[in-house]
Image (cartoon, rainbow, N blue to C red):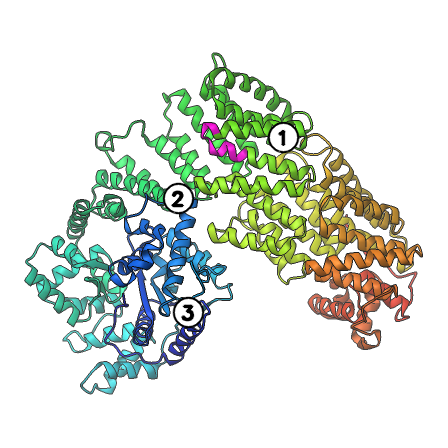
């Protein structure tokens, strides 16, 4: 159970060792902590962790060690955790603790079946966390995970669960006196740009309980100390100097160079592989034979497996292993396995093998693993060995077996990887030698891969694989299979918002199958075409085909197709999915799909019920449907598929809208624990909260959503955040530009203007109204801004009156239209209390934050009309909401109004006009003329960034929340006077 020890002394790592022991001490004190130890190969990560583990074990800490293994392009699901659990299972002291967590038996080959879906997977994760927490009742726990750069995705997901949001802080029963500590190492120089570990590291290092420890190369003096400590005899200074120079701070390089320095091959090549092979060649012939076989097995190999692969008597094997250990090439472990002291040693020996040797040994390991079983658990390794032994037929069979095993374990990413390996091997295997599976050919196998990709949340890979299936279809392909491929491709394209292409392929699929007599293939092709037609605005076509296909589905007795078509009709007919009549259709569709066992269609019906409630303004009624849908998705392993992803987003959006912001953030964090982050599907409402709370970097995070391939939801979220951010910082030109660009991009992609255009227009209008108000304060008529306001309110009116479904928008759209109208009044003629009262009332359907923002504007309008008591009442209500939400910018705006209007209970001002510096007075003067930060910088010969800093200081000192308010306060306090002849701010074209 302890980590492999090393005879080399630990030199030059005192600070790192002290830091790790500090973390262990905090874990002893009840605080779960983790350290990610990174560094180049050979820099000393393993040695540092070995020393830490040995000292911790001596002090009474239970040390659990798991290793990740390089088996080529495939992964072994949960391997390091399986190793840890195997060691615990072999120790009778832990039998009772293991028995209390039966879910983990699945990783040991026991338990009630394999991990079949996301629900089982979550229980497995919680079981591992609970097991570690229960172990902490008896002793401090240190979990060491080595070589994360080789970890499979399932292991990475489990590690994410343990480290995120208190995964290690949730005991199964009672509160343990200790908390587990996790130390995990990885090679920094192995992490290329697309390495799958990089996104996980980026997540983990942001957690407060996780820290990163990077091992730098040792200073020359420490390398020299290390070299001398390793050698009993006195070394010539020149030798030490040469080793130090060539090692370049790498302890492993230094040890290897030292080991080779006493041979007759002192004139070694610079490449480390050559140094390693010099030592390798010093071994006897039998020892070299054993090392070659071990190198083919991987970094670690069990004694019995190695013995059978080499095929020599036990005595000779033991002598050879002893020789390799003495030469510090292999290190024995407590579990009877042997490990190369460093992965580079294994790589050097492996590379030195002749092609025939390599192929023969891979074949031997594959056959031995085949004989030993259990078959599923060894399938990934067998597939790797068979492939490297140039036995494509057996490699294909093992890859398919590994894919089946990964699916049972609830590891869709590994399933996909094995299926892709099988597809690569398929053409190299004669048809007669391929696995005898009914109905399996290259096309159906590729379609299975696309389904695995979709379940793993990789929609673009699903599209790519389905395109491959389309290419693989021969000219004489069965028309039903050809249609199936095309409508599957159309469905996958809808999942990545490639709407026009989806419509084209669904049209082709429908045309390939005769409608009469009706067939199941035609019905499903029609159902997909209805979906695609709706998305490109062909509602009449969608409605006609949906009605015809529904009759056919009823005639053929296909209940899940009936359900799918009923969902489509509920979108297309009458009042859409928000009408009571159509929601009754959706409930019928949900029951039909459930009885038919078609979970994806059931997910669609549940999502439609939820979004129908949302669109009707029934936000609280929306949440139970979402809870049911997500629970159903968990039980069936579909959490990463499109509709559950939409449900996750909608749940967060509803919580945000209701003002349950902390709950929204917790739910988003829980989503990312269970599944990898899904772009805009979880980050949107989180960014809305971040912006409303004034968090730095919210705009930058939104801007990052626009990188990479076009994503409809990410584009929408980024557009909303960036438009609102520009308005909040007083940049109307940028707000209008961002609004126009977002609406144009979404319209071009979908073929129609999005419903959200009314929200975007209202946000941009807010900035325009601010600019128009500044112009009036400066004594100018804001003609350009009023023209822009007319344009924007026109967009809002048209969009709200004729939404995406061809009917007026619901309560949300009407509320945003009311705000747009009120902002338009503020832009063209000044604040209108009646208009702002309508906006406040409209947002009363449940949007807490937007209603508070409108109350602030209503208070301003009431104050301007001399209705001070009403203004104070509205301002206090808005302030209470802002305080409860933690909406700092809104709170500062309300406080500024209370001070400026000298309303009752006004908070004291935090700044004073007299505190303005001479430079700030110059900036304020230009600010009053409507200058942008760039223009201020040009006139004062400073950078735009410096000008922005001065503007921020002015706002703070004047107690203003916007440029408009700052100018108003300055006029009132007599700091500046109107300049009628000053040029105005340029409006956007």
Q: Is residue 564 above or below residue 716?
A: above
Q: Secondary structure at mark 1?
A: helix
Q: Earlier in the sequence, mark 3 or mark 1?
A: 3
Give the percent coordinates (x, y) of residue 871: 87, 57
CA gap, disc 3 to disc 2? 35 Å
Q: CA distance from mark 3 to mark 1?
A: 52 Å
Determine the image quadrant of residue 646: top right
First in sequence, mark 3 or 2: give its number: 3
Q: Residue at x 22, y 65 (%)?
A: 334
The answer to which of 665 and 398 lies nearer the viewer is 665
Of marks 1 and 2, which one's residue comes earlier in the chain? Answer: 2
Measured in 3D between alpha carbons, the distance from the residue under mark 1 to the one under mark 2, in whole angstroms, is: 34 Å
Residue hosting label 3: 178
Classify 59 as above or below 710: below
302 with respect to 114 (left or right):
left
- Image coordinates of residue 958 in percent, x first then y, are 81, 69
Q: Is residue 599 within the magenta segment?
A: yes
The residue at which mark 2 appears reads as 412
The boundaries of the magenta stretch are: 595-604
| Crowd around label 1: few <14 · some 14–19 · many ≥20 (10 Å) | many
Element at label 2: helix
**Which quarter of the image is occupied by the N terminus?**
bottom left
Q: Is 649 part of what is drawn in magenta?
A: no
Q: Residue at x 75, y 49 (%)?
A: 764
């Amino acid at each position: 159970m302890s980590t492999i020890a090393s005879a080399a002394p630990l030199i030059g790592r005192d600070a790192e060792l002290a830091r790790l022991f500090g973390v262990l001490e905090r874990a002893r004190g009840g605080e779960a902590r983790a350290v990610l130890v990174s560094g180049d190969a050979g820099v000393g990560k393993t040695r540092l962790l070995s020393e830490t583990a040995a000292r911790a074990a001596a002090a009474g800490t239970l040390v659990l060690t798991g290793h990740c293994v390089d088996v080529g392009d495939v992964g072994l699901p949960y391997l390091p955790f399986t190793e840890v659990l195997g060691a615990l299972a072999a120790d009778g002291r832990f039998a009772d603790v293991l028995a209390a967590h039966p879910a983990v038996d699945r990783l040991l080959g026991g338990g009630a079946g394999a991990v079949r879906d996301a629900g089982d997977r979550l229980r497995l994760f919680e079981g591992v966390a609970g097991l570690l927490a229960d172990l902490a009742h008896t002793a401090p726990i240190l979990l060491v995970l080595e070589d994360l750069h080789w970890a499979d995705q399932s292991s990475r997901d489990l590690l994410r669960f343990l480290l995120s949001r208190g995964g290690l802080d949730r005991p199964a029963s009672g509160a343990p006196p200790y908390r587990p500590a996790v130390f995990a190492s990885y090679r920094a120089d192995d992490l290329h740009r697309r390495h799958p570990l990089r996104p996980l590291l980026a997540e983990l290092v942001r957690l407060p309980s996780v820290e990163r420890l990077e091992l730098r190369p040792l200073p020359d003096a420490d390398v020299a100390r290390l070299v001398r400590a390793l050698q009993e005899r006195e070394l010539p200074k020149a030798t030490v100097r040469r080793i130090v120079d060539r090692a370049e701070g790498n302890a492993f390089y230094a040890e290897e160079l030292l080991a080779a320095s006493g041979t007759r091959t002192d004139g070694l090549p610079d490449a480390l592989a050559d140094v390693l092979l010099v030592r390798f060649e010093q071994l006897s012939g039998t020892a070299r034979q054993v090392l070659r076989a071990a190198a083919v097995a991987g970094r670690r190999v069990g004694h019995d497996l190695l013995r059978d692969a080499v095929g020599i008597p036990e005595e000779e094997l033991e002598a050879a292993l002893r020789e390799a250990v003495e030469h510090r090439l292999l290190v024995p472990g407590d579990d009877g396995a042997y490990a190369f002291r460093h992965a580079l040693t294994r790589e050097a020996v492996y590379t030195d093998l002749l092609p025939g040797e390599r192929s023969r040994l891979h074949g031997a390991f594959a056959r031995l693993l085949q004989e030993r079983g259990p078959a599923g658990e060894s399938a990934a390794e067998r597939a790797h060995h068979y492939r490297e032994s140039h036995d494509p037929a057996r490699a294909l069979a093992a890859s398919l077996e590994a894919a089946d095993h990964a699916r049972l374990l609830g590891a869709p990413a590994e399933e996909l990887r094995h299926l892709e390996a099988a597809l690569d091997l398929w053409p190299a295997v004669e048809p007669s030698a391929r696995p005898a599976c009914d109905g399996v050919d290259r096309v159906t196998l590729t379609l299975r891969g696309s389904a695995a990709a979709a379940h793993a949340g990789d929609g673009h890979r699903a599209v790519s694989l389905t395109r491959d299936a389309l290419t693989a279809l021969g000219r004489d392909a069965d028309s039903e299979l050809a249609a199936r491929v095309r409508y599957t491709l159309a469905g996958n394209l809808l999942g990545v918002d490639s709407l026009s292409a989806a419509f084209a392929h669904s049209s082709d699929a429908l045309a390939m199958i005769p409608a009469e007599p009706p067939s199941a293939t035609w019905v499903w092709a029609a159902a997909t075409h209805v979906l695609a037609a709706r998305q490109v605005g062909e509602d009449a076509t969608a409605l006609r085909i949906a009605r015809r296909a529904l009759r056919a589905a009823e005639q053929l007795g296909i209940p899940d197709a009936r359900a799918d078509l009923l969902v489509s009709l509920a979108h297309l007919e009458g009042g859409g999915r928000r009408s009571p009549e159509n929601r009754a259709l959706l409930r019928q569709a949900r029951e039909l799909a459930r009885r038919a066992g078609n979970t994806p269609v059931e997910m669609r019906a549940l999502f439609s019920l939820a979004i129908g409630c949302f669109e009707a303004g029934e936000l609280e009624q929306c949440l139970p449907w979402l809870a049911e849908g997500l629970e159903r998705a968990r039980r069936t392993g579909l959490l990463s598929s499109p509709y559950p992803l939409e449900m996750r987003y909608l749940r967060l959006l509803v919580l945000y809208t209701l003002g349950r912001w902390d709950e929204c953030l917790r739910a988003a964090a829980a989503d990312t624990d269970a599944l990898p982050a899904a772009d805009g599907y979880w980050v949107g409402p989180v960014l809305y909260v971040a912006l409303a709370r004034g968090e730095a970097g919210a705009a930058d995070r939104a801007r990052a959503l626009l990188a990479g391939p076009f994503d409809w939801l990410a584009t929408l979220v980024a557009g909303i955040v960036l438009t609102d951010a520009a308005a909040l910082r007083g940049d109307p030109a940028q707000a209008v530009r961002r609004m126009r660009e977002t609406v144009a991009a979404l319209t071009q992609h979908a073929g129609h203007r999005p419903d959200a255009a009314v929200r975007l227009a209202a946000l941009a209008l807010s900035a325009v109204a601010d600019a128009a108000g500044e112009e009036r304060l400066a004594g100018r008529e804001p003609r350009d801004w009023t023209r822009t306001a007319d344009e924007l309110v026109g967009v809002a009116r048209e969009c709200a009156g004729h939404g995406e479904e061809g009917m007026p928008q619901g309560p949300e759209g009407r509320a945003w239209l009311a705000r747009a109208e009120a902002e338009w009044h503020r832009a063209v003629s000044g604040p209108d209390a009646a208009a702002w009262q309508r906006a406040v009332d409209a947002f009363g359907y449940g949007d807490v934050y937007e209603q508070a923002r409108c109350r602030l504007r209503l208070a301003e309008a009431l104050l301007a009309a001399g209705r001070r008591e009403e203004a104070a009442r509205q301002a206090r209500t808005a302030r209470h909401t802002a305080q409860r939400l933690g909406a700092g910018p809104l709170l500062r705006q309300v406080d500024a109004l209370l001070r400026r209007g000298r309303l009752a209970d006004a908070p004291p001002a935090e700044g004073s006009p007299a505190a303005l510096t001479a430079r700030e007075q110059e900036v304020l003067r230009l600010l009053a003329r409507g200058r942008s930060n760039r223009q201020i910088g040009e006139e004062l010969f400073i950078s735009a960034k410096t000008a922005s800093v001065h503007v921020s200081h002015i706002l703070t000192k004047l107690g203003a929340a916007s440029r408009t308010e700052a100018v108003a306060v300055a006029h009132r306090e007599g700091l500046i006077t109107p300049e009628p002849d000053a040029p105005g701010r340029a409006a956007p074209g």
